[in-house]
Image (tube, helix red, strand yellow):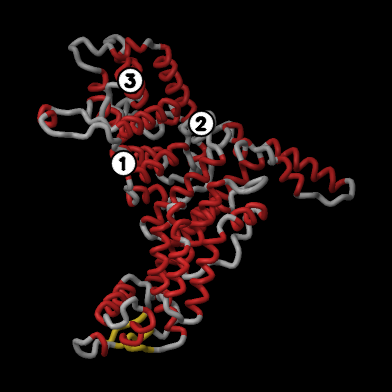
Amino acid sequence: MDPLLPQLLSFPPHPPPPVPLVDAAYDKEIKNLRKLLNDLPASALTAGVANGGDLLDILDPSINTLPFLYVLLAHLNAGKQKQTTIGSPLWLKALEFLNRFDSVQVRYVGTEFRRITTFIKDVAIAGKRARSRLQCSLEVNVDKGQPIVAVRPLRTAILRLDPSSSCFTSTHLLFVRLCLEARTFRAAKPVLDKRIYELPSSAKTMPSNLFPCSQHDTSSGFITDKTELSDTISYRDILHYFLYGAMIYLALKEWPRAVHFLEVVLTAPSRHHSTQLQVEAYKKWILANLLAYGEVPDSLPRTTNSQVARHVRSLGRAYEALGRVFKEEISKEHDVRRLNAEVHVGHPKWSGDSNLSLVVQVLDAYRRFTIIKLEDTYAALPISEIGRRTSPNPNDHAETAQYITMMISSGQLNATMEQNGKDPRSWVLRFAASSNTLALSEQERYQELQRETIKTAKLAEYVRETSRKLSLNKDYIHWLKQKTASGASGHAGDDSLMQNQFDDEDLMGDV
């Protein structure tokens, strides 16, 4: 191995040259290194060095990303993967790789990169922790999986490869599924909070003068079918990702984000009737709207397929009935008894759908939105009167005052509490003049405007890139020729021709 070591360390040159390599030269050199590594027998990579050390202790994954990765995989392929446990040397080396790999070099070894993420997941699910002598004296459950230990490494891998996380990959789905299994919901936010704009693109749509190592406008420029940084993505993979993401936001009580993710599932293109995932999303969408806004929209988003809409509604009647009772009782300022009865009758349904905890929270939301609605009619109300109208125990004025104080401090209610004495019964809730529950200061409005401006500029950038790729798509070119010919012959172009060209898109293959 020693004669080979200089070749493994030769690229990239270290320290970096004063004048960086141009993209074409970098592409050529790294492909030569990859060919060398592919041609080497595994035994050469696992043989170690003359002094008895291991190549993994010499190579730096932040500089020698490809050699480090190939040596690590060679060890795993040598039969050591089955013996690898959480905390073992190879596990720690895999973590080191995901924490330190060079995000440009790894674009040339997508398949090998995904093998490491899968390895981390598999070992974590197996949950067998390497025991030290101290651990051997303790009772440790080694049969139960530990998906939580894979969450941070996979999150690091996703954001290190693509800090924008704007291009959906198979690792995204793997990550959110692990977060759900481990119940580490907040750990998913750094990835879920970033908007998905694109899917891995075809290398055929890339400009010929760009290489994987080039500076790309968007991450789909290097996350392509050719670089294989993502496994093949199916229609159901996308639905699963957004449904799982919605479930995480529901667990975090971030209701508006949950509504958005569920609407992505519901409006996903479909040729025929809905999938079971869309039926499940519809039920949760009704509950999420009640929790977020205190009402359910009269109809599904406009872009929902009409057949999908009919099918999911036919299977979500119980949830629609719950939404209607919620709306009617709030509008009449009635107490919660009728809503309680509706919840009780549907208990087997909510439990069978694994939505019981959300339905229970809907009862609390009813109280919250009943209080918020009072500002439409009153400028101020004593706590005793609010308790009589909304509290499960109207005589517990201290609990009513505490509940309202929580709503004010969390920004759900734009009001102030006038405390006249120590007895909460005499306290008065005074609603703000603005009808906007979440009224913002001038500085906060300016900051919000800046954030929206940045989002809009980013969206425009992705729209331009998508338009460029579409213009290179052979189906689009064929449609454009047909439309041009149709116009030349005196007939209006029919946009439905374009839709027909994409009816057999691979992404929709398993609908």
Q: Residues within 10 Å of mark 1 (few under 14, many from 20)?
A: some
Task: Give the vertical position of 48 relative to 105 (above or below).
Answer: above
* SS label for mark 1: helix
Image quadrant where residue 438 sits: bottom left
Nearer the observer, 470 or 297? 297
Q: Amino acid at mark 3?
A: Leu
Residue 62 visible in the picture: no
Question: Which residue corresponds to mark 1?
Answer: 152
**Total numbered labels:** 3
Question: Which residue corresponds to mark 2?
Answer: 211
- From the top left corner, tell me how far across and down residue 126 is, in percent: 31, 31
- From the top left corner, tell me how far across and down residue 182 is, in percent: 32, 44
- From the top left corner, tell me how far across and down residue 361 is, in percent: 39, 64
Q: Which residue shows up at 22% across the image and 34% down it?
A: 141
Q: Amino acid at mark 2?
A: Phe
Q: Which residue shows up at 54% across the image and 51% down it?
A: 265
Report the Cα–Cα distance between label 1 and label 3: 21 Å
Report the Cα–Cα distance between label 2 and label 3: 30 Å
Q: Residues within 10 Å of mark 2 (few under 14, many from 20)?
A: some
Question: Which residue corresponds to mark 3?
Answer: 76
Sequence-first tag of 1 and 3: 3
Taking the image as shown, residue 505 lies to the left or right of residue 41, namely right
Nearer the observer, 268 or 455? 268
Task: Give the vertical position of 110 relative to 427 (above or below).
Answer: above
